[in-house]
Image (tube, rainbow, N blue to C red):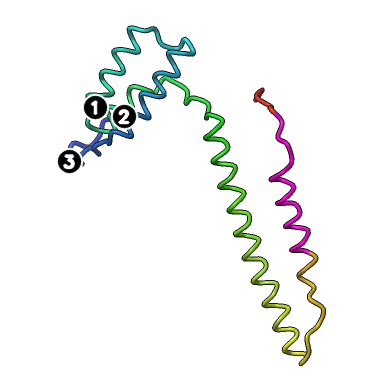
Amino acid sequence: MDDRRDPSIPAVRVSDRDRDDVLRVLTAALAEGRLDPHEHASRSTRALEARTGDELAVLTTDLPAPEPTRAERDRKDLAEWLAEWRYWLGGAVIMSGVWGADSARKGELSYYWPVMPLGVWAAVLVAVAIWPRGTDDAS
């Protein structure tokens, strides 16, 4: 099987951000001892001169992705926590709709039963936000 790209398909041009991402991987590899200073300088120069994604990809294919920083992990955790609150809101709308339809069918307001599952779910979300996280760096 031939892995070469079809020359009739134009290569995707890269942005400065793409180049910066590759430079971060190369710098992390230098700091970890995966690259020597000469090879780091050579690959960094090629990254800065790269025009297409193919040219950038070959510079990091033999390197592992660097571990995310604490700030990146915190941003990801916050985004996931906020997404869970959106799910909670969706559940509240659906359960309230079921409660409202049942109350309308009976012709009177019945006990608002969604308070229990929504309250427990909200308590778990709040606990996740305030519970101290361990510094488990051994993966």
Q: Which residues are magenta?
A: 117-134
Residue type at numbered disc 3: Ser
Instruction: Work out whether mark 1 precedes mark 2 in sequence or the reverse, and give the earlier one.
Output: 2
User: Pointers 1 and 2 in contact (CB under 8 A)?
Assistant: yes
Instruction: Work out whether mark 2 precedes mark 3 in sequence or the reverse, and give the earlier one.
Output: 3
Q: Check the image and report above or below for 87 versus 46.
A: below
**Residue at the limit of the structure toward the bottom, as seen here:** 107
Q: Secondary structure at mark 3?
A: loop
Pointer 1: residues within 10 angstroms few (<14), some, or many (20+)? many
Pointer 2: residues within 10 angstroms few (<14), some, or many (20+)? many
Q: Quadrant of residue 71?
A: top right
Image spot of residue 5 (x, y percent): 25, 34
Q: Check the image and report above or below for 37 versus 6.
A: above
- Which residue sits at x=33%, y=33%? 18
Q: Is residue 130 magenta?
A: yes
- Which residue sits at x=70%, y=77%? 98
**Residue at the limit of the structure toward the front, as seen here:** 130
Query: Which numbered disc, 3 or 1, marks the residue closer to the eye?
Result: 1
Image spot of residue 48 (x, y percent): 26, 24
Residue type at numbered disc 1: Ala
Q: Secondary structure at mark 1?
A: loop
Q: Is residue 11 magenta?
A: no
Residue type at numbered disc 2: Arg
Give the labeled residue for mark 1: 50
Give the labeled residue for mark 2: 19
Nearer to us in this view, 87 or 62? 87
Image spot of residue 135 (x, y percent): 68, 27
